[in-house]
Amino acid sequence: MLTIYGVYRSRASRNIWLAEEIGLPYRLVPVIQAYRLPDPDAPDAPLHTRSAEFLRINPNGHVPAMVDGELVLHESLAINLYLAKRYGGALGPADVAEDGLMTMWSFWAATEAEPHALEVLTHRAARPPAERDPAAAAAAVAALRAPFAVLDRALAGKDHLVGGRFTVADINVAEVLRFALPAPELFEAVPNVRRWLAACHARLAFRGMMAKREQEA
């Protein structure tokens, strides 16, 4: 059975969402981020990203990781692209052109959007108010305006990014853009992105994943 290492409050959420979309059986091995633990080296510490057991799976010390038979993969977006191609049916590419487009949008999300979206999340929501840097958040919002405009134009008159149907490209990009939700002013300027993201987040598999995420400590 496919094994996903991680927790819901990590980028493993992307892989869990995709697996749930396609009804793919999987085993989730909880691996918490070491920085979230008061003492990762404590004898009773749970399995975490610096645990020797996990470092044998991903020596980079990050979640998620995936094991499918003999194949071990790291990097959440790459894992999703693999799962979609192997198991995803219509969520995966129908041909090499769609494969290229799905890869392009996934790389776009990772390079153009995610670094800035994480800054928004960090300084608008994740950190305690006293530790937030409003200037860093404002700079990240400013940096996201151009890529958001690119995505908005790409979604004009379309419900999905590739092939006229919901695919792994939508999951990968939507999960990155979720980090930027604490900046609603970004989405006010891009109605196509706002409409598309709301549709992605209305999907039953996403809602189920998020419900379990909210229950997680």
Image (tube, helix red, strand yellow):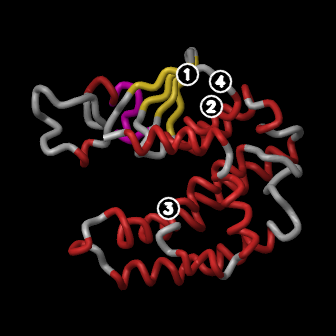
- Residue 19: give its label: 2
Real-space Cα separation, disc 3 to disc 2, in angstroms: 21 Å
Picture quadrant of residue 99 = top right
Q: Position of residue 192 (x, y in %)?
A: 76, 70
Real-space Cα separation, disc 2 to disc 1, in angstroms: 7 Å
Asked if the residue under mark 1 is in contact with the one under mark 2, i.e. CB atoms within 8 Å, the reply is yes
Q: Position of residue 144 (x, y in %)?
A: 57, 76
- Residue 26: give its label: 1
Asked if the residue under mark 4 is in contact with the one under mark 1, i.e. CB atoms within 8 Å, the reply is yes
Q: What residue span does the magenta drawing correspond to?
A: 55-63
Q: Residue at x 40, y 37 (%)?
A: 7
Asked if the residue under mark 2 is in contact with the one under mark 4, i.e. CB atoms within 8 Å, the reply is yes
Real-space Cα separation, disc 4 to disc 2, in angstroms: 5 Å
Quarter of the N terminus within the rendering: top right
Location of mark 4 (residue)? 24
Earlier in the chain: of badge 4 and badge 2, it is 2
Earlier in the chain: of badge 4 and badge 3, it is 4
Mark 1 surroundings: few (<14), some (14-19) or many (≥20) residues within 10 A = some
Asked if the residue under mark 1 is in contact with the one under mark 3, i.e. CB atoms within 8 Å, the reply is no
